[in-house]
Amino acid sequence: MLMDRYWEHVDDLYTRVKTTQRDAIERAGRLIADAVDKGGCVHINDSGHIIDSELIYRGGGLILYKRFKYDLVVDDAVRPRDRSDLDTSMEGLAAYALKKSGARPGDVLICGSVSGRTFYVVDLAYEAKKMGLKVIVITSMSYATSVDPVHSSGQKLYEMADVVIDNCAPAAEAMMEVEGLEPRLCAASGLAAAFIMWSVTTVVVEELMKRGKVPGVLKSANFPGGPEYNKGYVEPRYAKEGL
């Protein structure tokens, strides 16, 4: 069955992550623990492939993971016209977003982009490094090394990182060739990114507890007692201690 082939590909994907990315995962976890231990915060921004939705405010997850999103709202209802002769680049908007945010030097920014060139993620990492944040990148190195950069720095995401974790997804994402289909089937990056970040989380927890600091772990909001525990203990403690 096609499903059995898919399961084999998933097993192979996780095996590649485990055998090639362990060192990077451990370094990322220690980097986060060091930052949090010193009062820093952790911000997560990705291009839509699971990382932020998988980690933010999840039962069994850490309260200290916070989504970083930004946008510019413009209200200008003039008639549509050709503007191709104008410079409409949004490069540098991330600098404004960081200044407007609660980020500080020494914080950690976790960035996800499978191709490693998604413009707004790259621009955010670029400005975050200038501000003094530590940047952890989750990307497909197979993909990133086969495409050209779009940022004016000439860099892709992995070239801006303090720690790079390869999600081991193939270039163009999909894992399986299926007879009768021109495109390959079944994307790899979301599965790998979730596995990677939960692995990083175990390192963060272990490192903090070695230092006598117990990180706030959320309970499921739909399980009896979960909301009370989260609202009454985990959230107030995070607001006070950052854990």
Image: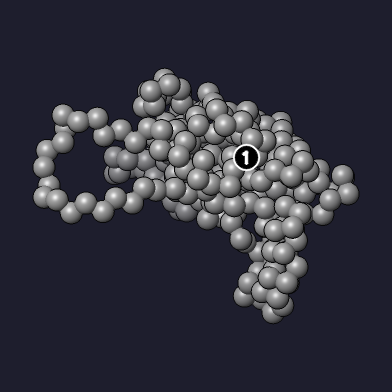
Q: Residue furthest top?
A: 154
Q: Position of residue 242 (x, y in %)?
A: 72, 52
- Seen at 71% across and 36% down, the residue is 31
Q: Is residue 209 left or right of residue 202?
A: right
Residue at point 29%, 40% (across, down): 182
Q: Nearer the viewer, residue 215 or 39?
A: 39
Say left or right for 49 vs 29.
left
- In this rendering, the answer to whether 159 lies above or below 38 is above
Whether residue 190 appears in this view of the structure is no
Please report the residue visible at 39 percent of the width from the left and 45 percent of the height from the top. 185
Q: Position of residue 159 (x, y in %)?
A: 53, 23
**Relative image position of residue 27 (x, y in whole percent):** 71, 33
> Which element is circle 1 on?
loop
State the residue at coordinates (62%, 40%).
104
The residue under label 1 is 104
**Quadrant hosting residue 115:** top left
With 79 as the anchor, is 200 left or right in this view?
right
Residue 106 visible in rendering: yes
**What amino acid is found at the position of numbered circle 1 in the picture?**
Arg
In the image: residue 44, left or right of residue 234: left
Residue 170 spot, x, y in % from top left = 47, 34
Q: Dividing the picture into quarters, in which one does residue 148 lie?
A: top left
The residue carrying pointer 1 sits among few (fewer than 14), some (14 to 19) or many (20 or more) residues within 10 Å by Cα, namely some
Total numbered labels:
1
